[in-house]
Image: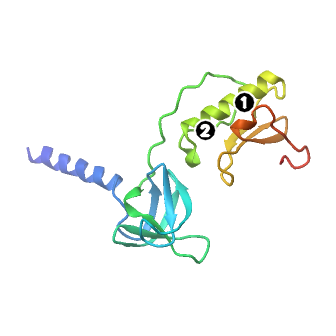
Amino acid sequence: MNRILTISTLLLTLAFQVHAAATAPGTYYVAAGELNVRLAPQAGATIMKTLKRQQKVKVLEVKKGWAHIAGSDDAPLWVAAKFLTTTAPAPQAQEELPNDPRIKGLPAIGRDGATAKDVKTLYEIAQYFLQSGKCDHIEFADRQHSQPGTYTLRCGGKNYYFRPSDMQKPTADDSTGKK
């Protein structure tokens, strides 16, 4: 009986450690789909940027449920500590898309914040490019992180940048691959 109780206690302790919020300085992972980074440790503070699920962060200190994280500039950056974990969260479930061997390099749902809608949009535009004859295969497709709502598709050595509303008119520049 003692052995069972000990094993149960150990498993329960491990379960809480895996999903524990940041409580001290160290390396953590973002557990939320997206996590706002703020200039001050309060919900109404200015949002500087957004972190994505599974992104690694270095916590410098924790105060009243807020984690002060290291950034590339001198501005203080804060996130809600309850959305950080000590271990990388499991990848999100993937939506089944029809298998087309001509399409390579679609992102997984959850990778760098890619949503199921993003992946489906990229698959549909890849199909459009293939069916229209613009490409005979897709080398890479992803969303643009610097321009929300914009996607990138690479085929035939060219990068195409588009928004879903542009599906009839994607453009490319042979020399730079940019619009």
In the foreground, 21 or 10: 21
Q: Position of residue 155 (x, y in %)?
A: 80, 35
Q: Is residue 19 above or below residue 104?
A: below
Q: Can residue 85 be seen here?
A: no
Q: Are marks 1 and 2 in contact (CB under 8 Å)?
A: no
In the foreground, 162 or 140: 162
Asked which secondary structure carries label 2, the reply is helix
Q: Amino acid at mark 1?
A: Ala
Quarter of the image for the N terminus: give it.
top left
On screen, residue 136 versus residue 66, left or right, reads: right
Q: Is residue 37 above or below residue 175?
A: below
Of the numbered discs in the image, which one, if any, rests on residue 1?
none
In the foreground, 104 or 45: 45
Q: Residues within 10 Å of mark 1 (few under 14, many from 20)?
A: many
Q: Label 2: which residue?
A: 118
Residue 172, by quadrant, is top right
Q: Position of residue 96 (x, y in %)?
A: 54, 26
Residue at 71% of width from left, 41% of height from top?
A: 163
Of the numbered discs in the image, which one, if any, rests on residue 126?
1
Mark toward the start of the polypeptide (1 vs 2): 2
Q: Position of residue 111 (x, y in %)?
A: 56, 45
Residue 102, by quadrant, is top right
